[in-house]
Amino acid sequence: SDPTLAGQVFVLKSVFLTNCVRANRYGADFVREDISEAESSWYNRLGVTPGSPETLAVRNIGSVVTPDRPYGIPHFFLFHPNPLTEEQDTRAAAWAARCTRLVIEAQVGDRTCYYPVTLPALRRNQTCLVDEIVIRRAGAPDPEQEIPEAVEIVFRSSVQPWEQQYYDKDAS
């Protein structure tokens, strides 16, 4: 059980989001109390909910990735705000409201590995851009389990306000 990737084929299988809020009040900035604990209020909770919308996942990628041939195709996800911070995420074995996570699923050698990355609290009109992902060692067998130092991600987020023309009825 060598935790490194040396000499193993790394095939990117999918990239998806877990623990996504299913619905909320339109146009609101949420706080923890606005988020329902009910399982039915979440898409892809713990990475296993069937029927999640296509806007939360890119499946069947099947790309071999090497240091000399990195994967560089951009993907875009559309999801509802999730105000939970890492400190509020219980990571309990039983279901509870959690932070939204970006998960990379890969075939490493003969096993499926997951690389979950907890996203910061997400607000409306916010973009979260991933600039770089570096995978350093074999990942976890579960999409919610994080392996220390297995993945390093560089991202930035910013709030993108609507332009005035969308609010102004007199705009031409």
Image (tube, rainbow, N blue to C red):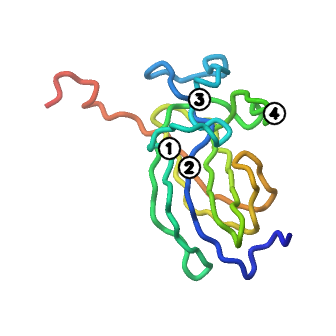
Mark 4, secondary structure of its residue: loop
Mark 3, secondary structure of its residue: strand
Give the mark, 4 or 1, whose residue is nearer the N terminus: 1
Give the mark, 1 or 3, whose residue is nearer the N terminus: 3
Residue 10's mark? none
Q: Type of residue at label 4? A: Ala
Residue 16's mark? 2
95 left or right, relative to 16: right
Would you name the residue on which mark 4 appears?
A: 92
Q: How many marks?
A: 4
Query: In the displayed structure, would residue 104 be above or below residue 93?
Result: below
What residue lies at 64% left-to-right and 44% top-to-bottom?
101
Q: Residue furthest left?
A: 172
User: Residues at badges 1 and 3 in contact (C-beta under 8 Å)?
Assistant: no
86 left or right, relative to 19: right
Query: In the displayed structure, would residue 75 be above or below residue 63?
Result: above
Give the mark, 4 or 2, whose residue is nearer the N terminus: 2
Would you name the residue on which mark 3 appears?
A: 42
Q: Type of residue at label 3? A: Trp
What residue lies at 51% left-to-right and 43% top-to-bottom?
158
